[in-house]
Amino acid sequence: MAGKISVHVRLVVWLVIGLAGLARSKAARNQPVQFEFRHIQEKDGLSINFTTCFLQDRDGFLWVGTFDGLNRYDGVRFHAFKHQRNDPQSLLNNTIHDLCEDHQGNIWIALDNGLSCYNKATGRFRNITSVDGHKLGFTSNVLTDRRGDVWFTSTGVGLHRYNTRTGQMEYFPFHKGDNPRTALREIAKNGLLEDPHRHGFWLAHWRGLSYFDADQQEFISQANNPGHLPIFTDHSVSALALDGERLIFSDNTARQIVVFSLAQRRILKTIAPTSHQKKRDVFDMATIFVDRQHNLWTSSWNYLLFHISADYEQVTELEHDEDRPTSIAGGFFWAGWQHPDGSVWLGTVNGISLTNPERAFYNVYNIGTLFPALNDERGIHCIVEDDDGSWWLGTSIRGLLHYFPQTNRLEIYRLPNASAERPYGRVISSIARSGETLYLAGETGLFTFDTKTRRFSDLPLPPSIRRQNVRVWNILKEGETLWVTGESKEAYRYHFLNRQWETFSITPPPGRDQFMLSYIFKDRHNTIWVDVYPAGIARFSPQLNTFELDEHTRDHPYEKSVSDITEDSAGNFWMSTNGFGLLRYNPRTHRYTNWTENEGLAYDHCLAVLPDAFGNIWVGAYNKFSVFSPRTNRFVNFTLPYSSSNQEYLNKLFPLRNGHILGALKGYLVEFSPEKLVKQPPYLPSQLLISQVTVGDSLYLNHQDLTQVNLKADETGFTVHFGALLSDSHTPFDYFYQLEGYEDWKPAGELRYAVYNRMPGGNYLFRIKGVAPDGRETPVKTLPIHLATLFYQTAGFWVSIAVALLGLAIGFLRYRARQIEKVHTLHMQASRLARDKTEIQYQNLINHLNPHFLFNSLTSLNSLIILNPREASAFLRKLSIIYRYILQNKDKELVSLADELSFVQHYIDLQRARFKEGLNIAIEVDPDNLSRQIVPVTIQNLLENAIKHNIIDKASPLVIRIYTREHTLWIENSLQRKEFVETSHKQGLASLKSLYQYLSQRDLTISETATHFIVGVPLL
């Protein structure tokens, strides 16, 4: 028989003292109720872990007092207030003991050396260190009564009242004749309470319990006890608490908690909790917190913590355990606060610990503390449940374990294949159970284990497995047979009746010769399926007695990464994959559906999948879990603070008979209760919080009396921060936000702020809401934001600018019109003068030519009369035609080119009569240009200019060519320049050029080469 090792956790026996007159004492049981705590600490923004008090103000924010400043918490971020040495309007001291809010919304803070009052509207503190000249000193308690007055206690003076209506401060001595030095002092922290029915206050101190009648201004105590109440003694008293009409306090002298009925005026119960830790005294008590379910949460000065049930019958000791991240963060707490969702928040010396037993949907079992070697390897691999509710656990080289969750007891069994190298045996990869027999796949062997006799037996391995020396991974018990798969290409079935093995070969798909059979499972129709890694899944056909590959599951990339397969009640196959997220395969439609982190899955590297009885799919990815609802297509994600620093394990999910799901995380087992998620829909807060608006280094804190945030004109980029007080580690709804008038509703995703840049000035309304997976919505929270507009961007400014510009434009246009009119008149006058000047110059030119031409012509005529009278007559006729043309056109600006050429021909004839063979003139004019216009006598002037400036003789004749090209008349003459021209004034061409500038945009061009002089006259 393999060796058996039993590990028992010490159970503390309930102690019952039945002696008359003594209260019954109860010890904290070892495993009654598990409290799983989540922590909020310095890493989350808390100013320091040592937390002393809580206050939720009327705006919904949680104020947290610590030993290093005051914190305002919006569920996402903390804003800390601290003492600033050079700022008298900052917090008086960083050591905070108590908080309250008055009816005006001001926050009052009890400190080491006095009192501070924070005004939300101004963001400043008013500090009080003395009353009537008396130093307050250590201020332990502060509260606002139902009438709106603020009451506080200090060691320097005693009990005080601040009248918020008159602004007066009063102190109340213990005896009317005493001065403040003998007043009631040394009132313990958590030692001041307002009576729920009368206008009075209960005070706890080392000399006993007292009551102050505020109307009569009288103290009632042991020395003054007209009603003979049994609670007024000289015992040391601390930790006052109220539970409805019940006053609860710690009687440290009697070592008991007293429950007193204010209505019945009698003691209802005394409770004397004891610790399983030896020589640890539970008293003195520092804190008693009562939750809405009437449970007590207590903390003592000896760092002992207890949870006492509402019926006072069950006392559970709470301990901080370094090896259990979900244990309470510290061994002492000063304050408690209950969230609207029922969770209890405890302010400990090591941060805020919160737990919600009502909504807790899992219990954690730390098997590793019972068997530390379990954490050295991959931990727990497989689980099967026994009829008595205990669990059989298969481990990685740590043997077979038997765990009893009811008593936290563990049994350890070494496997038959144990060796010096593996003292507990090799890996147990799979367990199946039938009656009192367990079937174990032990990697290289198959075993049975008799749960009654605690004996192992070997099962023979299939011959091919022995021959191939491959490992066995999965087993499945079906009737009188046992299915086995592993690193082989074959599936095996063992028949217990004849002790024979059956081998089933899988025909691989084309090109997939390398494969193995990993997972084997049975669907709801008792059909056997195997995962043909990496080629899909195959179904066993009893008729054909063979496995048939489902062709539709082939050739998918995620087939190479399937880590677990299961079936839901609808017949869908769900697969977890390593890297491809969650898969659903419908064997009827042969359709795959895939969900990854993009669709809300916690982590794409999934290791386990299992449906629950409510149709939800649970997915495990190390210590990250997702619960998927196919109905709503939404995920709920959460992370457990276990095995987060080591991922050398395979976490699995296993169904239990009670409908719960058991998860393995290395050396931890987590029992999930799916029905709690279904029966308790995700908590939806009654309000969301818009906490602050930040602009660079500027901060605008939001509060109820803030009508709007006013931003300066240059603060065009701002960030709005929002959140909600939640006890869950995950947000059970989605945030949506909108800046009304600027954008539509937008999902916030994982962000808890909205950023806006380069915003135009104006009035905006920021809105935020939460939407749960089931469609429920939170009320919309709003914050008006006014962004001032730069003066040059205001409508009035631009209207003024427009009016001014319009006036300037009208004035300028009128001025411009007048100036243009003047300029135009001047231009007209200048043009007229210039034109007149040019015409005069040109006329002078013509007039200047006439005498010379006439003189030369008359000389020629005289010779002709003597020599040839007939030619003289023709000569005289042409001369008269020329002068007639000049006289007829002297007032015309333009004549046709045809008329000009006709006139020029007569002029040429006269010149030829004079120069004979010394003058050669050719005319080559395109007929299409004859209708175009030219200045009268232009050609004559140019011919006369050529004749005047060049040598003409028979030996060197002057050649002149007149031709047209591109609407220009060209007059070109050979260049044989005279050395001296007697009658030249050099004004002819200039005058002609000026005249053409007024008549056309095309200039008269003059060019000269080594052999020719060329003038181009534009034809108009």
Image: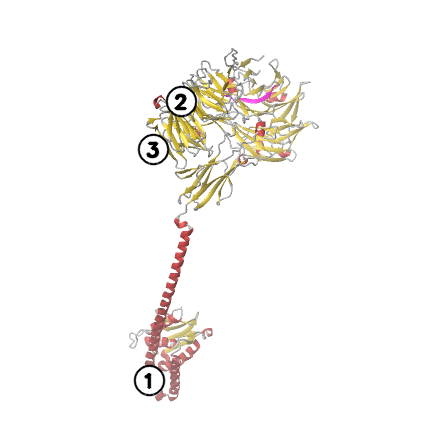
What residue is pinned by disc 3? 88
Q: Secondary structure at mark 3?
A: loop
Cα separation between marks 3 and 1: 125 Å
Label 1: few (<14), some (14–19) or many (≥20) C-alpha neighbours in 10 Å: few
Query: In the rendered view, would you say 88 is above or below 248?
Result: below
Q: Closer to the observer: label 3 or label 1?
A: 3
Residue 187 disc label: 2
Q: Quarter holding the N terminus?
A: top right
Residue bounds of the magenta highlight: 373-386
| 1006 lies left or right of 367 | left
Cα separation between marks 1 and 2: 150 Å
Query: In the rendered view, would you say 975 is above or below 572?
Result: below
Kind of residue sitting beneath label 2:
Ile
Q: Position of residue 460 (x, y in %)?
A: 63, 18
Kind of residue sitting beneath label 1:
Thr
Kind of residue sitting beneath label 3:
Pro
Q: Position of residue 108 (x, y in %)?
A: 41, 30
What residue is pinned by disc 1? 859
| Residue 735 visible in the picture | yes
In the depicted view, which residue is nearer to us: 762 or 476?
762
